[in-house]
Amino acid sequence: MKNDKKKLSQIIIKDIITKIQDGVYSRQSRLPSEMELARTYNVGRSTVREALGVLKSYGVISSLKGGGHFLEDIDLTFLITTFELDTEEYMRIKYLLELRFTLESEAAYLAAERKTEEDLTELQKALDSIKSTLSSPDLPGQEEDFQFHKALIQATHNPFMIKVLDDLSEWYQEALSLTLKQNIGLIGKRQSVYKEHEDIFNAIKEGKPKLAKVLTTMHLDSVQKKLNYLFWMKE
């Protein structure tokens, strides 16, 4: 398989989605094993895992430990429609995400160490707001999502971190608007995003800084995969 400037995992993602659309892979059926897919696409298993990770983050597939990967019965229209994200927008959000990986992962660690009851109250309030949007299919919930991350940064009690977020709040909300609107109508995906926030909150509440940091990194990695996919599909 030739890599025409695109990562091989991107090509695999598109091909699997096409096969689902064409009926080659039936809904709610089991995908070929990672080894079989690696042979089919003539790539290493790590490349296959990367592609499957993106599909899983979108709720296209689910996996069972030791049991393989299964196709979910969802509407794939949102994955094949044109997404209006130009290169400049993509790069701006990408650079912001690079900062968020550094800022928020460390912030989650510090928040788990330094949080006060007031901080936990604000985080819980923001988390409840995110949950409330799940019952409103037409609301992307970017403001609610932003308030959670803002409360997380404030729980560090680090004035410089708080200042960085304040200065970049406009870009944060623009990026959230572009990515979260793709979840509209996808209840399973939205519930998954809520669960990611809930897990981060619980780790902070329980005073587990290392876990909070890891969970925040995983959450942002999911956002990165989503952003990449939306941009790849445009090409």
Image (cartoon, rainbow, N blue to C red):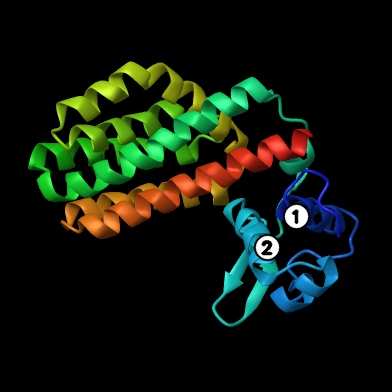
**In this rendering, position of residue 194 left or right of residue 11:** left
Q: Are marks 1 and 2 in contact (CB under 8 Å)?
A: yes
**In this rendering, position of residue 84 left or right of residue 173:** right
Which mark is first along the chain, 2 or 1?
Answer: 1
Q: Residue at x 69, y 65 (%)?
A: 48
Q: Position of residue 20 (x, y in %)?
A: 82, 58
As drawn, the label of residue 199 is none
**In this rendering, position of residue 101 left or right of residue 230:** left
The one of 50 and 116 positioned closer to us in this rendering: 50
Q: Position of residue 96 (x, y in %)?
A: 46, 29
Q: Position of residue 143 (x, y in %)?
A: 40, 26
As drawn, the label of residue 47 is 2
Q: Amino acid at mark 2?
A: Thr
Q: Amino acid at mark 1?
A: Leu
Residue 210 occupies which quadrant of the picture? bottom left
Q: Pointer 1: what residue?
A: 8
